[in-house]
Amino acid sequence: MKRVAVLANGPGELWGWARPVVKELKRDGHEVDLVLLPCQFASGAEERISSFLEADHVTPPGRFREVLSSSGKRPYDCVLQLGGDLLYGRLLARDGKTPLFSYSYGPKKGLKACMEVFTAFEMMAGQFGKAVPVSIVGDLVPDALAMDTGVSPWRGPGLKIAVFPGSRPAIRRKALPYMTEFLAAARSFLPGAQWVVLLFPFGEARETAQWEEAGFDVTAAGTGVVLAGTDVALTQPGTNTLEMFHAGVPSVVALPEDFIAQVPAPVLLAPLFSLPWIGPALKRRAFRRYIGRKGYLCWPNRLLGRELYPEVTGSLSVEELADRFASYAGNPAWRDETRQALSGADRGLKDAARQVKERILCNLA
């Protein structure tokens, strides 16, 4: 049996990546330490969320030095980093003395220090370059969806719409008043629809009442359970778009310009974007340049090379967003065409968590 350190940072990596990997390692009896790293994308609930995982020990953010000091007395057999700055993984691997592995959707600094890098899709693998040892193992997101439990919130006939308000409290606080107005406008376009907000596992207990007062139904079921009965989803860019991709759910990805201020900035640019008056304008300009360079905001569109999921961005009023969303959600032909396209999409290898485990053990043999 091996002693493995699994490093994770943001909410998407912790819930969508670390959860199935930890479960797979524990299935074979390996000892797993889960180390939570500092992250500008953190939701603030990572330590609480980690209690749902099966790790033998969890180290909260800010206590990485303790892990470093203890690892010298009882070393790990390997380190697996899921997202975040690889400086942490390299330090814990003690610059090559312990095998270092990484699972990543794209290139980053320090990957050359890894014994092997794992990624989800062939398109992603092509971004790393020949100097990095990359293996395509499949996407961990569907493994996480298969772990979700709970009671489906859907009831009766009518259009079933899932709303994803974000994993971070700052975005949800910003979204609540906006979405309250949005729902009032959207109901005039989509009468009889059921609107369900997904807060689990990132939301706090008090938020349920706030969203219910706004007119939404709130569910504590896992995303995989909810998406199984969803007709269409409204979401922001992020890992959750891959959840909908793998579940085959038609979705609209929205990021009104008013929300750009809530998008975490790279650490080096954060002070610039925080400047009074000029900071927000610089951030909006950088965001537009990012879209122009990347082409698409959400991963499904980037994987497919076309805008299957409509991306609604720019300066939008609540009424304009409601109208745009309803033009898709209320169109049965668009929903059917999207589902058909998703059913034929290549979702890559299955059982990614098992693939990761087996590749690690093969390297350690």
Image: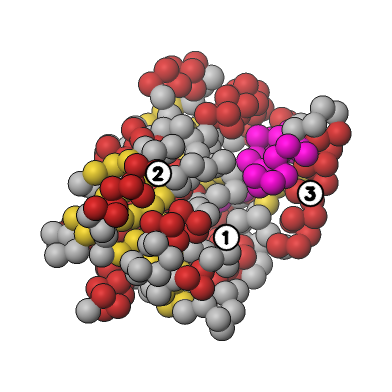
Q: Is residue 123 in sight in this rendering?
A: no
**Residue 339, horizontal then vertical, whole percent:** 50, 61
* Residue sitting at x 29%, y 54%: 72
Q: CA distance from mark 3 to mark 1?
A: 19 Å
Q: Is residue 297 in sight in this rendering?
A: yes
Which badge, 3 or 1, comes first in the chain's sequence? 3
**Residue 352, horizontal then vertical, whole percent:** 34, 67
Q: Secondary structure at mark 3?
A: helix
- In front of the other: label 2 or label 1? 2
Q: Vertically, is 350 above or below 168?
A: below
Residue 51: image tag: none
Which quadrant: the N terminus? bottom left
Q: How is the image coloured?
A: secondary structure
- In front of the other: label 3 or label 1? 3
Which badge, 2 or 1, comes first in the chain's sequence? 2
Tell me where residue 219 sits by quadrant: top left
Q: CA distance from mark 2 to mark 1?
A: 31 Å
What amino acid is labelled 2 in the image?
Answer: Phe
The magenta segment is 251-273
Circle 2 residue: 64
| Image side of residue 143 versus residue 186, left or right | left
* Residue sitting at x 46%, y 54%: 88
Q: Secondary structure at mark 1?
A: helix
Q: Secondary structure at mark 2?
A: helix
Circle 1 residue: 299
Q: CA distance from mark 2 to mark 3?
A: 32 Å
What amino acid is labelled 1 in the image?
Answer: Trp
